[in-house]
Amino acid sequence: MSTDSPRTGDEWSRAELLARIVTESQRHHADYSLLNQAMADSVGLHPTDMQCVALLGMEPGPVSTGDIARLTGLTSGSATRLVDRLVKASIVERRTDPNDRRRSLVSLSPEARERIGAAWDTPSRAFGAVLESYSDSELAVIADYLHRAAEVGRTQAKRLTSGEPG
């Protein structure tokens, strides 16, 4: 059965819907990885660096290198090297933590925030156009699913990297 069928949700069995969601989630992940690579190439960054920039853009304020390691799943040494590359490229700024002078905090530079934000303008409008076709209650379900799925992803990534059995 084609997943491109114009049937409505009421015309799919639960098993078909669940299978479709799994398939579409895998496609979404693969396609988003391609988008991340293309966006990274367009702004002159490595895809891992681009992912870090995206995560930093969502944080309410500066974060420590340890926080970057936690957000990206990198080791502390790899996160430090990533921050060093981003500082050298003027993508992030590193400042001493005013509450703990032994620690530094990292944030996107205003210029990088503007430049990379501008690169996301067209993709953001395209994704926004897709979301416009959904009702508020459908958007709530989509947001809930994405939140819960991300939580599962983080938990499973932690399980896999720690060597815990399935």
Image (spheres, rainbow, N blue to C red):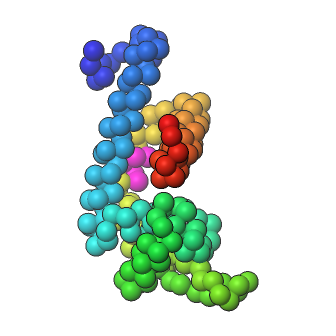
Please say whether residue 23 is one of the residues in the magenta stretch. no
Q: Which residues are magenta?
A: 124-128
Q: Quadrant of residue 28?
A: top left
Q: Residue at x 40, y 29 (%)?
A: 22
Predominant secondary structure, magenta span: helix
Residue 138 drawn at (x, y percent):
54, 30
**Along the viewing direction, whichever of 164 and 136 lies nearer the viewer:** 164
102 relative to 71 in the view: left or right: right
129 relative to 149 in the view: left or right: left
Q: Measured along the vertical axis of the image, is residue 28 above or below residue 121?
A: above
Which residue is the extreme one toward the right? 99
Which quarter of the rendering shows the N terminus? top left
Q: Residue at x 38, y 61 (%)?
A: 120
**Along the viewing direction, whichever of 57 and 72 lies nearer the viewer:** 72
Residue 130 drawn at (x, y percent):
40, 40
84 relative to 56 in the view: left or right: left
Q: Residue at x 28, y 23 (%)?
A: 4
Q: Residue at x 51, y 72 (%)?
A: 76
Residue 3 drawn at (x, y percent):
30, 22
Determine if residue 69 is in view.
yes
Residue 73 drawn at (x, y percent):
48, 60
Q: Quadrant of residue 104?
A: bottom right
Q: How many marks?
A: 0
Determine if residue 8 is in view.
no
**Along the viewing direction, whichever of 87 and 35 lies nearer the viewer:** 87
